[in-house]
Structures are given as structure tokens and as C-alpha cells.
Image: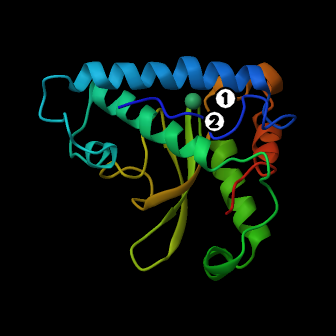
């Protein structure tokens, strides 16, 4: 696996997410998960599998679980943010959010609450189930809902990293402020 290039500059998400945090998060943390995943699967039957298939492996444990999740989660995370993000979704996604949560504001409360209340390090997710139903859940560590029995079990289409390394330089202990700022950079397209 290769560390994906960011689709924008490290300072592209300022002032909502600062350049220093983005640089360390991408070039150190995500790069570390990538290298550690490659080392952990080297010479095993995991080599050649997709990251989705690796995450979906029953009984995944240790370095493959932690770094496989870390590789997948951050790859999705960069892609769901944009310097031109924010606002509200449109089209089929807007319809699905309204059908499931009643309104965008209700969805935002549900998602933000999952992010704020995930104890310790982890993630909050918006997932889609087969048939199109949406779901929000949280997961600890670098787990994600592709892993059997974890979270809501859907396919993640939006995720927020709530590890302290994702926000502490700029927001310190104020995770709720970071979660609120994240909504200004969500790439709904
Ligand atoms: Mn992270």
C-alpha cells in the first residue's frame, strides 16, 4: 500500500484544520500506519488483498487490525474534506439523510454527538447499508465498520478522526469545537 497524496495543500483546510496538524497527521501518522501495515502483511496471505477485504477479515488482530484500519480510515478521511467544502449535501445523499434522520440538522446533531462522545481515541462514521439506509456510529482506536461486529456494520461514506493527534495543536481539549469546524470542510460532492 502507498500513502495517498492529499488532494489539497496542507494549509488548504485552514482556518478549520491547521497546516501543521495536517502535515504531521498525513506525513507522520498516516505514513506510519501505511509502513506498519506493509510490514505486518509482508509474506502473509494478506498480500495482494484490497484494504477493504483486509478490514473485513474475521478475527483481525494486532498490527494488521490497527494499521489496516489506520490506512483505510485516513485514506477516506482526506477524501471527505475539501477547501471548498461545507454547506449541505444535495441530490440522492440529501434525500437519504432526510429520510433517515428527518433533516440535515438532525443528522448533524447525531453525527456530532457520536464524535464528541467517542471515549478516548476513535472515529465517528456515516455509513450506508445495502438498500441505501444510512446509519451513524462510533468506533474505538483504528477500528471501522468494515470490520465484522464493529460499529453499525455499514460501508463508511464519511468519517471524522477524533484521536487527539487530529486536533490537539489547534483545539487542545476542545473536541466539540473541532467537530463543529469539520462541518465547514466536508466534501459533500
Ligand atoms: Mn489520525
Q: Residue 113 placed where, x, y %?
A: 69, 52
Q: Is residue 52 left or right of residue 189?
A: left
Residue pictured at 58% horizontal, 43% vertical: 77
Instruction: In this rendered view, identify the residue nearer to me: 70 or 43.
Output: 43
Instruction: In this rendered view, identify the residue nearer to me: 19 or 138.
Output: 19
- The quadrant of the picture occupied by the C terminus is bottom right
Residue pictured at 45% horizontal, 18% vertical: 32
Vertical placement of residue 187 versus 177, above or below:
below
Secondary structure of the residue carrying numbered label 2: loop
Vertical placement of residue 51 versus 35, above or below:
below
Q: Is residue 149 left or right of residue 183?
A: left
Q: Residue 178 placed where, x, y %?
A: 78, 38
Residue pictured at 82% horizontal, 24% vertical: 170
Vertical placement of residue 131 versus 158, above or below:
below
Mark-to-mark CA distance, 2 and 1: 6 Å
Which labelled disc corresponds to residue 162? 2
Question: Which image quadrant shows ligand 1?
Answer: top right
Residue pictured at 72% horizontal, 69% vertical: 89
Which labelled disc corresponds to residue 166? 1
Q: Residue 163 placed where, x, y %?
A: 61, 29
Dots 2, 1 in contact, CB < 8 A: yes
Q: Within 8 Å of ligand 1, the CB of disc 1?
A: yes
Which labelled disc corresponds to residue 35? none
Vertical placement of residue 95 versus 53, above or below:
below
Q: Is residue 181 left or right of residue 50?
A: right
Instruction: In this rendered view, identify the residue nearer to me: 182 or 35.
Output: 35
Amino acid at each position: 500500500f502507498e500513502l495517498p497524496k492529499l488532494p489539497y495543500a496542507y494549509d488548504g483546510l485552514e482556518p478549520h484544520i491547521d497546516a501543521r496538524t495536517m502535515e504531521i497527521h498525513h506525513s507522520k501518522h498516516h505514513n506510519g500506519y501505511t509502513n506498519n501495515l506493509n510490514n505486518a502483511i509482508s509474506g502473509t496471505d494478506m498480500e495482494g488483498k484490497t484494504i477493504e477485504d483486509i478490514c473485513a477479515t474475521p478475527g483481525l488482530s494486532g498490527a494488521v487490525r490497527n494499521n489496516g484500519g489506520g490506512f483505510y480510515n485516513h485514506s477516506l478521511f482526506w477524501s471527505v474534506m475539501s477547501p471548498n467544502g461545507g454547506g449541505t449535501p444535495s441530490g440522492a445523499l440529501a434525500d437519504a439523510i432526510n429520510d433517515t434522520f428527518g433533516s440535515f440538522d438532525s443528522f448533524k446533531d447525531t453525527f456530532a454527538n457520536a464524535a464528541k462522545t467517542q471515549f478516548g481515541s476513535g472515529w465517528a462514521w456515516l455509513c450506508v447499508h445495502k438498500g441505501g439506509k444510512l446509519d451513524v456510529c462510533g468506533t474505538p482506536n483504528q477500528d471501522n465498520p468494515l470490520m465484522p461486529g464493529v460499529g453499525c456494520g455499514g460501508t463508511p461514506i464519511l468519517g471524522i478522526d477524533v484521536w487527539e493527534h487530529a486536533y490537539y495543536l489547534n483545539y487542545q481539549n476542545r473536541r466539540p469545537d473541532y467537530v463543529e469546524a469539520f462541518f465547514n470542510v466536508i466534501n459533500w460532492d
